[in-house]
Image: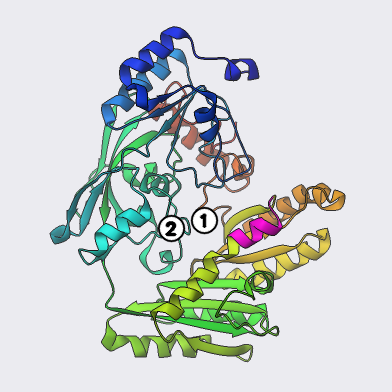
Amino acid sequence: MSATEIDAPLARGVIQRLAAIFPPSALALDLASRTAYSYDNSRRQGLPQAVLFATEAQQIVALVTLCREQRLPLTVRGRGTGTTGASVPDQGGVVLSLERMARIIEIDPANRTVRVEPGVTNRQLQQALAKEGFFWPPDPTSAAVCTIGGNLGYNSAGPRAVKYGTPRDNTLALTAVTGAGEILHTGVATTKGVVGYDLTRLLIGSEGTLAIITEALLKLTPLPEAQRTLRLLYDDIAGATSAVSAIMAQPVTPCALEFMDSGALNLIRDYPGLDLPPEARAMLMIEVDGSEACLDAAVAAISEAARNPSLRSLRSAANASESKALWQARAALSPAMRRIAPHKINEDVVVPVSRIPELISGLERLSQQYAIPIVNFGHAGNGNIHVNLLIDPHHPQQAAAAGQCLDQVFDLVLQLHGTLSGEHGVGLEKRDFIDRELDPIALGLMRSLRRLFDPDAILNPGKMLPP
């Protein structure tokens, strides 16, 4: 669509048909509402021509049918916490918010499942499950506000993925509306099943480009009997990253293994209760869970694997409040970076765990080469490192070098047999880079699949796959 078409109001006939599908409280045409749904947690923005709030699948079927007839772009979103622009309506059209589809339909402890709608937030779900003695493993940093639909759309995981896996590993079945306006049921209600192709895993991580998820059957895990949080400080990054490889090579898998480099530590040194000595150049935060009887042995095994000449201190949280303070410091890191560098470039790349040392040393070289501060932290147990280029767009040298530096970051990741995104997705931010990772045959098949699911290219057009 052209800029003129994007800015133009919807035709009266289209508005009347939308009003027949959605009640007045679920159809927003005013500028303030449209602006509120024009952006996500990236720096991108695109003004939609209308915002709709669905409460049932049949409304979505009718909306998709209308959008197909009118060739109207349809962008689906939850709470807009994504960082890659995947929920930004950059081509205008309509935004479909699923935030009002927020029912926890059924918790089934006997079968360790829960059936939910996509607008339930991660925290709401976890609180409800905890009362039954369960949890759903994915735990993004934005869990307080991000929705289950968003978690599924991006395959967003978080620290616990190192032990418990991602949404793809913890979802049994989906109900969704395709771009053809058909209701699709995928998956099974059992933990084993091999009939047909795995469309459930295909839809998870597809960023709303294939279908709109309206319901999910999620696989639950019993809450652990006990857990322990460890903080390890190292004199250098090489020691910390070597420890990560050693930890992941022994039998006990931690439920979280987080890494922070010296740049990250400098941003949180003054956080209450952390007591970080200036000599510490890297930190690992490790959480171990399991039965109370086995926890001491598990902690001992991980602690032994983590020891090397670079280890400065190893501290175990004395109680739940101290453990909470450590994790709050980790959660405070991203906001701290955004305060000092609001225009920073935030990438979440993944490399094999054994190659984390090469990644970090390569990033240090790029930081020096381009005179751009680079802060690294993330889920080291999976090799998922969040690389933050703290650029100042008003600094001519940094502004000029940012694109080339990012280009070299991606080349480095691929040279190390990594991937360009672990959990933030592709959206618009990485769309034009993914043909470096995916070969032409794979891209061709993905485009063909997209046409099958969305024959008129109305669902999140222009996202994820390069033109």
What residue span does the magenta drawing correspond to? Answer: 335-342
Closer to the camera: disc 1 or disc 2? Answer: 2
- Where residue 66 appears, x then y in whole percent? 38, 16
* Image quadrant assignment for residue 26: top left
Residue in the image at 44% along x and 74% along y: 324
Q: Secondary structure at mark 2?
A: loop
Q: Examine the rendered structure and indicate whether residue 316 appears above or below residue 402.
A: below
Q: What quarter of the picture does the C terminus occupy?
A: top right
Visible residue check, residue 192: no
Viewer-proximal residue among 128 and 256: 128
Could you classify mark 1 by the number of other residues whose Cα lies within 10 Å: few (under 14), some (14-19), or many (20 or more)? Answer: many
Q: Examine the rendered structure and indicate whether residue 460 appears above or below residue 142.
A: above
- Where residue 196 appears, x then y in whole percent? 26, 42
- Where residue 304 appears, x then y in whole percent? 48, 90
* Image quadrant assignment for residue 416: bottom right
Query: Is residue 341 shown in magenta?
Result: yes
